[in-house]
Amino acid sequence: QVQLQESGPGLVKPSQTLSLTCIVSGVSITANYHYWSWIRQSPEKGLEWMGAIGYRGDTHYMESLKGRTSVSRDTSKNQFTLQLSSVAPEDTAVYYCARGLLEYDFWGQGTQVTVSS
């Protein structure tokens, strides 16, 4: 059974870098043809895909977040990480990791991140 679990700080100060990790179990993140995404949801913007890393380690980012977003992976721990720099209050959202690039079949439960001083 494929499971994803997000972890990271619930509160981040403005201008800092947010770092979230998604631990994957039940399948290798290097398994053929799978992509692993970060998605966030807020009342203002709804669901917003942020970026992804593929089974070969290739990365893809939403254009508007390209300069602030980085997705990486640790294959030895079967996990992937989101870093979002220069956060602002509008980055407050529930952050999810999921399997897929355009459609998603497995999701983490989500983690609330609040940006506030």
Image (tube, rainbow, N blue to C red):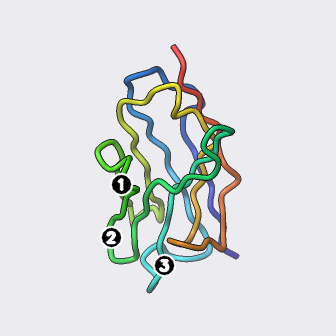
Q: Nearer the viewer, mark 1 or mark 3?
A: 1
Mark 3 = which residue?
A: 34
Disc 3, SS: loop
Disc 2, SS: loop
Q: Residue 28, relative to residue 96: is it above or below?
A: below
Mark 2 = which residue?
A: 57
Position of the N terminus by quadrant: bottom right
Q: Residue furthest left?
A: 67
Quadrant in the picture for residue 111: top right
Quadrant in the picture for residue 2: bottom right
Give whichever of discs 1 and 3 has the lower sequence position: 3
Left or right? Give the position of 67 relative to 91.
left
Give whichever of discs 3 and 2 has the lower sequence position: 3
Near-viewer residue (40 or 71): 40
Q: Alpha-carbon distance for marks 3 and 2?
A: 10 Å
Asked if the residue under mark 2 is in contact with the one under mark 1, i.e. CB atoms within 8 Å, the reply is no
Mark linked to residue 63: 1
* Residue at image point 36% right, 47% down: 69
Q: Name the residue type under label 1.
A: Glu
* Residue at image point 63% right, 55% down: 5
Q: Alpha-carbon distance for marks 1 and 3?
A: 21 Å
* Residue at image point 44% right, 86% down: 32
Q: Name the residue type under label 3.
A: His
Q: Nearer the viewer, mark 1 or mark 2?
A: 1
State the image coordinates of residue 9 (x, y, percent, origin top left).
55, 33
Asked if the residue under mark 2 is in contact with the one under mark 3, i.e. CB atoms within 8 Å, the reply is no
Give whichever of discs 1 and 2 has the lower sequence position: 2
Q: Name the residue type under label 2.
A: Gly
